Image: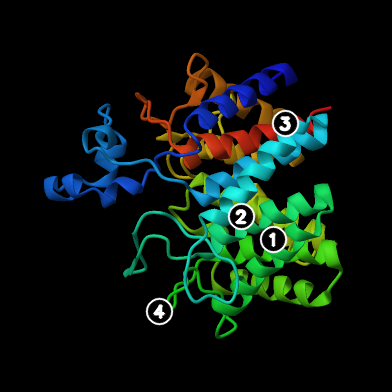
């Protein structure tokens, strides 16, 4: 994929989502709709339907902190590449928006959660309950803003997020996925928070961040063989492999290199010759835009030519150039829902990283 094509897609994505004021839908949000609940329709049926049930149900669009953070990271990468002040201003505006939409409550630091309720490990999680992964990606946005601008206010905000992650989510030295009394663990949450701590260590050289990051990654692989989970989706496996590589780079260590190699060996087999991103190692369909985005992100540093194949396939089969948006899935029929975080934010971030690494 040519740099001009990537820049044109990013420009269109910016225009589309700016027009939407960064409000949108997500695959799990429609479960909140009373109409859908009363009809007894499950989420998969709704999301795979040609009918836009969200419009029929008059379901409102929302801000997604994860999406805002990813768009911010995208603009920061573009600013580093081009020096265009518009990209820096866009990132600053989104950082301010993140501060406005953070979760409220009796927390020791700044925290963010999703706008929809979910059931996780038999526990009902209320909407806007802060979680490790969402808060972690927001922290990465503020850390990146500090590294680009050297404005200490962003470093201070990042430390407030780390305080929440370290204090509220690790009351018993075990990372909880959600800020609730019940124990909710997730290995990907460990890796996201470890990535934040590793970047804090890179910024400050404070060994306390380094030690916490090492402990979280060790716990992640002690709990389970992360890569061997049978139904692990392509995007989760790819995110884990990517985060582990980033953590080792920031900590300047090869402690988990064998774990990385094992994950990479499984992950690279989950793509077709033409760049199709399969659902997981056991089945091909559905082709999901989130898998393509993660494929570009994870493959870019290790196999740039394969990352470009994945990007080209997604562009040819999921992208609507007239609207400036990416679609959701192929089963093999195309599901034309445009989700804010799942489709646009992850693809924008993926293409920005690809642009950064292209010679």
> Label 4: few (<14), some or many (≥20) within 10 Å?
few
Identify the image quadrant of residue 23. top left
**In this rendering, does residue 196 appear at all?**
yes
- Relative depth, front residue between 220 and 35: 35
Residue tagged by mark 4? 182
- Count the labels in the image: 4
Q: Earlier in the sequence, mark 2 or mark 4?
A: 2
Q: Image point 44% across, 44% down: which residue?
A: 282
- Relative depth, front residue between 88 and 332: 88
Q: Could you say whether the residue bearing mark 1 is in a helix, strand or loop?
A: helix
**Contact flag, marks 2 and 3 (Cβ < 8 Å):** no
Residue tagged by mark 1? 195
Q: Earlier in the sequence, mark 2 or mark 3?
A: 3
Give the side of residue 267 with respect to residue 2, left or right. Answer: left
Residue tagged by mark 3? 86
Query: Please, which residue is most extreme toward the bottom here?
Result: 172
Give the quadrant of the N terminus. Answer: top right
Q: Position of residue 140 (x, y in %)?
A: 68, 55
Residue tagged by mark 2? 137
Q: CA distance from mark 1 to mark 3?
A: 28 Å
Q: Could you say whether the residue bearing mark 2 is in a helix, strand or loop?
A: helix
Q: CA distance from mark 2 to mark 1?
A: 9 Å
Q: Nearer the viewer, mark 2 or mark 1?
A: 2
> Label 1: few (<14), some or many (≥20) within 10 Å?
many
Query: Please, which residue is most extreme toward the left here?
Result: 39
Q: Earlier in the sequence, mark 2 or mark 1?
A: 2
Task: Please say if 74 is above or below 253.
Answer: above
Give the side of residue 234 with respect to residue 156, left or right. Answer: left
Q: Image point 44% across, 78% down: which residue?
A: 183
Task: Please say if 175 is above or below 36.
Answer: below
Give the quadrant of the C terminus. Answer: top right
**Contact flag, marks 4 and 1 (Cβ < 8 Å):** no
């Amino acid at each position: 994929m040519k740099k001009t094509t990537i820049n044109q897609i990013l420009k269109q994505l910016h225009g589309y989502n700016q027009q939407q004021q960064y409000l949108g839908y997500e695959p799990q949000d429609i479960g909140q709709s009373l109409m859908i609940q009363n009809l007894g329709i499950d989420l998969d049926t709704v999301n795979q339907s040609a009918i836009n049930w969200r419009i029929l149900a008059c379901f409102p669009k929302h801000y997604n902190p994860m999406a805002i953070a990813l768009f911010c990271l995208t603009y920061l990468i573009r600013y580093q590449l081009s020096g265009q002040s518009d990209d820096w201003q866009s990132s600053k505006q989104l950082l301010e928006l993140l501060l406005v939409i953070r979760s409220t409550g009796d927390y020791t630091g700044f925290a963010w959660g999703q706008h929809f309720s979910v059931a996780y490990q038999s526990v009902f999680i209320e909407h806007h309950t802060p979680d490790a992964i969402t808060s972690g990606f927001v922290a990465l946005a503020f850390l990146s803003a500090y590294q680009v601008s050297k404005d200490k206010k962003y470093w201070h905000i990042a430390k407030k997020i780390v305080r929440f992650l370290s204090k509220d989510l690790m009351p018993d030295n075990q990372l909880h996925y959600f800020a609730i009394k019940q124990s909710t663990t997730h290995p990907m949450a460990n890796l996201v928070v470890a990535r934040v701590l590793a970047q804090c260590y890179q910024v400050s050289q404070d060994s306390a961040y380094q030690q916490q990051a090492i402990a979280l990654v060790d716990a992640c692989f002690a709990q389970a063989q992360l890569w061997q989970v049978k139904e692990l989706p392509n995007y989760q496996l790819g995110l884990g492999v990517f985060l582990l590589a980033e953590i080792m780079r920031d900590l300047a260590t090869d402690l988990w290199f064998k774990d990385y190699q094992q994950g990479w060996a499984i992950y690279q087999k989950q793509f077709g010759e033409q760049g199709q991103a399969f659902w997981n190692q056991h089945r091909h369909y559905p082709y999901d835009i989130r898998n393509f985005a993660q494929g570009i992100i994870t493959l870019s540093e290790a196999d740039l030519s394969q990352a470009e194949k994945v990007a080209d396939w997604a562009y040819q089969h999921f992208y609507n150039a007239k609207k400036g948006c990416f679609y959701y899935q192929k089963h093999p029929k195309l599901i034309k829902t445009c989700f804010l975080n799942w489709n646009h934010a992850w693809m924008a971030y993926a293409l920005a990283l690809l642009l950064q690494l292209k010679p």
